Image (cartoon, rainbow, N blue to C red):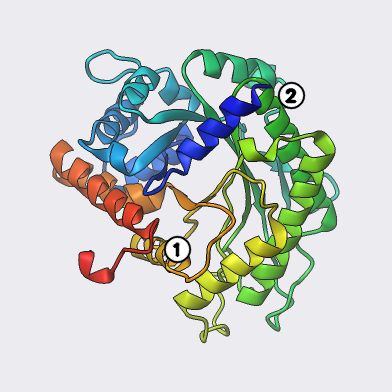
Amino acid sequence: MDKALLEATAAALVAPGKGILAADESNGTMTKRLEGVGVESSEEARRAYRANLFATPGCESAVSGVILYDETIRQSMDDGTPIPDYLNSRGIFPGIKVDTGTVDLDGCPDEKVTKGIEAEPENGWADLGTRCAEYFAMGARFAKWRAVIKITSDGAGGRGDLPSGTCISANADALARYAVICQENGLVPIIEPEVLMDGDHMQDVCFVVTQDVLKATYAQCEVQGVHLPGTLLKPNMIIRGNDDTIDIRKTRQDVADETVHCLNRSVPIEVGGVVFLSGGQSDEEATDHLNLMNAMDVEHPWQLSYSYGRALQAAALKSWAEEGAEASQAAFAHRAKMNSLARSGDWDISLE
């Protein structure tokens, strides 16, 4: 394990003014996104859209890395340059999604655990160590693994039966195992334990569950020997469930305050940086929340950055389908610039 290299890569990924583009949608998810804007999905359509996005002039000023899917890392730009080589030439780190999805968790109805460490011959996947070594050779320098944690409410705004302790433990163990394997193969692991916004739970419940999940995850990282300065955390923000109709008093400033408070209680200061997921937030909402956190009159223990998917791509995809390549790049460049400003607390709604 080259700890110095891992730390340097993690630091570069959260350099001031920069964040990560999550372009790692599976083929199934990307098909839904394309069909949602009236485009028939195919390997070439997926390649063409993403290649155009990556070629956006000047995007390297706001994008430090791009998370790719297995199909995409093997594809090329329009001129035949392999996508990882092209990104590296722009000073953008190629990354790779290495989990292979979720499966039902035995004995825990309606809960999932993420898979991808063991080989899956029936799906054509080698074991994680083998795949990480191959991705590193192809130019990737970081990876991502997503766990999904579901909350249920008791109907009175409190926490229901989910998540179970078994679900939290199983996913924490998998995240730590993944992180060690990545680091042994030269890849900075992004640890993503996502507490879903689905449901009618209140913001306070999201706080408690997120805290429990993060503490369990880092306890496992310590047990398994993960080198924390050579990792990044990709957490959810502390937001009420999207079906909640009770918690109407919470403001965006409340979200920023509670998110920072939760991280301070749950995340070791040695972690290399924090790159938030946007979850079910709107483009502008995700930018505003990040901006409010970075505008606080305190020095955070970590760089607070972004690893956004839809919040960076939604407008670009719609423009690509309706107006063409240049309009798509303009839409992406705008959203990247807005989030770059949010990294230093300098974004304002008037800039939209």
Q: Is residue 111 left or right of residue 326?
A: right
Q: Could one spot residue 127 in this view of the protein? A: no
- Disc sitting over residue 157 in the figure: none
Identify the secondary structure beneath mark 2: loop
Residue 275: horizontal and vertical position, in percent?
A: 51, 49
Dot 1: within a 10 Å radius of its alpha carbon, few (fewer than 14), some, or many (20 or more) residues? many
- Disc sitting over residue 294 in the figure: 1
Residue at image position (27%, 28%) is 48
Question: Vertical placement of 301 versus 63: above or below?
Answer: below
Nearest to the observer: residue 222 or residue 242 = 222
Question: Vertical placement of 152 versus 190: above or below?
Answer: below
Amino acid type at circle 1 is Asn
Q: Is residue 181 left or right of residue 194?
A: right
- Tell me the CA gap for discs 1 and 2: 39 Å
Nearest to the observer: residue 44 or residue 167 = 167
Q: Which residue is mark 2?
A: 118
Residue 72: horizontal and vertical position, in percent?
A: 41, 25
Which quarter shows the N terminus?
top right
Residue 202, located in which quarter of the rendered image? bottom right
Amino acid type at circle 2 is Glu
Identify the secondary structure beneath mark 1: helix
Question: Vertical placement of 217 versus 9: above or below?
Answer: below
Residue 349: horizontal and vertical position, in percent?
A: 27, 70
